[in-house]
Amino acid sequence: MSDGFDRRYDPHALEASRQAAWRERDAFRTPALEDDQPHLYIKPSAPFTSGNVHIGHVRSYSIGDAYARFRRARGEAVLFSFGFDAFGLPAELGAIAGDELPSEWVKRCAEHMTGQLQRLGFSFDWERSFLSSDALMYRWSQWLFLKLYEAGLVYQGTGNVDWCENCQTTLASIQVEAGGTCWRCHGPVRLIQLPQWYLRISAYLEENDRRLAERRAGGTWDEVALASQEIVLGRVDGVEVDLRTSDGAQLTVFTPHAGAVSQASFVLMSPRSPHADEWAAEPAVHDQLDQLRSGGWERSAREAETIPVIDTGRALLHAGANELPVFISPLVDSRFGPTVVFGIPGEDRADEVIAQRMGLEPPAGDGRADSAAAGPAAGLTPGADGARADGATADGVAANGADAGGADLRPAVRCKAFDWVVSRQRSWGTPIPIVYCEACGTVPVPLEQLPVLLPLDIRPTGTGNPLAELEDFVQTTCPACGGPARRETDTLDCHFDALWLWVPACVPPDARADSLEDIFALPDLRYWLPSERVVAGSDSGNFVFDQRIVTKALRDIGPLAFLADGEPFAGCLFHEMVTADGRKMSKHLGNVVDPDELVERYGADTVRLAVLYAARPQKSLNWSDSAVLRCHRFLTQVWSYSQLKLAEAAERASEGDASPAAGDAKDTSEHLRVKLAQWRLAAIERTTEDMENLEMHSAVRNVMRLFERIKDFEKRVLARDGQLSRANREALIEALCVLAQLLGPLTPHIAEELWIAFGGEEHNAQTPWPGVSLQVPA
Ligand SMILES: [Zn+2]
Ligand SMILES: [Zn+2]
């Protein structure tokens, strides 16, 4: 263009030039600690080094980046960085498929994904990003393991694992096909018990539950996130009672059906209950329990119809005369955790099936058909009518006490969430820092000997654990007695690495190699933690739940003592996923949207705006090209209209502006100017509120509306006065400049380019929010 104003929107040139400018001025470096500076840490999800950034990542990081940029635009210091979750099965499988070493595979993937994310213009502090498989980083996992072990929060037990007899290997759950068969050989998969390392989350379940109520009251945890924490916890409210056998042995039994305790016909115990061995003491019974634990059972046999049930041959006295046989079955675990529960066929279909399988007579007057009669029968005492069967009210509990053989029912809670297995029989993971010595037994590796290095030349094949076959790794000396010892060859599940993945971003890169004790003493952690907001997919509930547990553990152990409530995240936004035609995107269905292709075609700003515009974060985003087309058209119009107005203004100025001044007889549109100013202010107010609440879809709509009103203003003035007065032109440019500022966090490239064209100065990180004056760096 001869006038210097390029009316054609060329996102590729524009975005390349903005990104070069950001690199040049190191725009996203985490600001230095300044105590009087408002500051916050926004935690994005840690992506798996899966190979490619997919549209779900784009959605997640577009939301997080818009929020980070918004807070910077208001003058706050923001920490925004992440680590790649690089250990684990996806990387191992990727490496096997590509016939590569896993260490090379993850490095290549991380580099490629970093390039993709940079092309999208996300404002991460890349200097702080890392791979969880870097030795400097996984020593955090090892340190955490040892600290938790020392505190009794990591322990050895036996646990169920999926096992393929053909392949002689344990399988991750995603390697088990829908029909309960092996992904490699399609043979049957059994659940067997192996020695495993556990994380004792049970110690903090009650507090996690209690603190969730505080999160709810705080208002910065969205509904999806709150609900996910409840689902993971799996809290079941009910009652418990102590029952005895005729020879005096005692057992505490739980049920959610407070009003139906008298209708119980058996007791069901989890094989993981601490009482299981004692109750299966009879040799023939114990054989069955051993068989259940070591031989396992068909993985598909998880329903009440097929799941193993062991009769202990013992019974508890109940309601005076009734005897309740005690059975052992893993059916309990998935429903109530590793506990002991009443079997009440009249209340529960699974219990009905078990009763039939074990040949129990339904108790007189019981059964579903006449449950109306069972209600009053149960309610010999006042208040325990059928309608209250599930309500463990204090009255109901006390009233039913007389019913349960004279014992007292008391309110009780069980949780499905329970200690989980942190070890895996796989090679691509953090080595567990434990050695086994014949003289000393299980010996933790001393902290000063960390990290226990993972040999990088291991080539996994999909069967067995190559680490266990590597004698150089396995053979070691005992740190306690100096004698020969063997290393633990299980590695940590990458879910364990995720327990700390939110912390290292707070550590300045030059302090990374320090001892972890020194790192925990840094003021940086106290400055940035807790994170103001974690922004992640709604499938992150487990991660966040366990991160909350471990924060409480590290608070009590000491390193995170400054987090009094043991909560790592003050706020939490969980967004739903991106679907196509209402279905999950998959290569198999051929409905995958490729972000690279979209960026190539429309530019990064359009793609970012489209994913923000198409749905509110808490809704799944059903992909359609119409959102992309709409957003591309919008940005194209904003660009060319702004350039046109700037060109006209420049032309007027060069001619010595002769257009009518305000108050001039030819300027009869002051009321329209006032109206435009009102619209402008309303747009700022609404968009600010939207951005504060991470309602980006609404923010985009408010910005689009402002643009319509700006154009409408010009149309009306022209219809009235035939031309724009100087005051009207200034008002219009001012409104367009505000529009660019509001777009700053959403479409940062075009926004900054326009901001500069309107005479704004380049700020270090971000175009300022309207009404905010940012310091321009010297
Ligand atoms: Zn197999
Ligand atoms: Zn020893």
Image: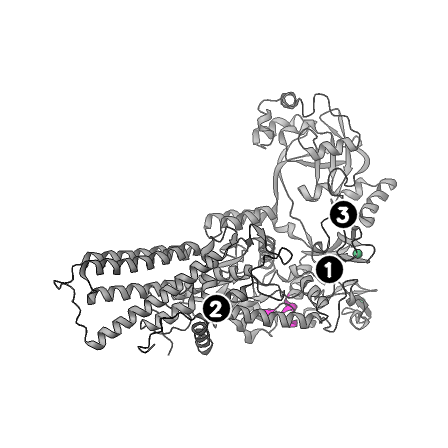
User: Is residue 399 highlighted in magenta?
Assistant: no
Q: Is residue 766 visible?
A: no
The mark closer to the camera, 1 or 3, is: 3
Element marked by disc 2: loop
Residue 457 position by quadrant: bottom right
Tell me the crowding category of disc 3: few under 14, some 14 to 19, or many 20 or more residues within 10 angstroms, Cα based: some
- Label 3 sits on what residue type? Arg
Tell me the crowding category of disc 2: few under 14, some 14 to 19, or many 20 or more residues within 10 angstroms, Cα based: many
Range covered by the magenta-colored residues: 130-140
- Label 1 sits on what residue type? Arg
Query: Does label 1 or label 3 sit earlier along the sequence?
Result: 3
* Residue 407: % across, % down: 68, 30
The residue that mark 1 highlights is 424
Foreground residue among 422 and 113: 113
Element marked by disc 1: strand
Q: Is mark 3 within 8 Å of ligand 1?
A: no
Foreground residue among 258 and 702: 702
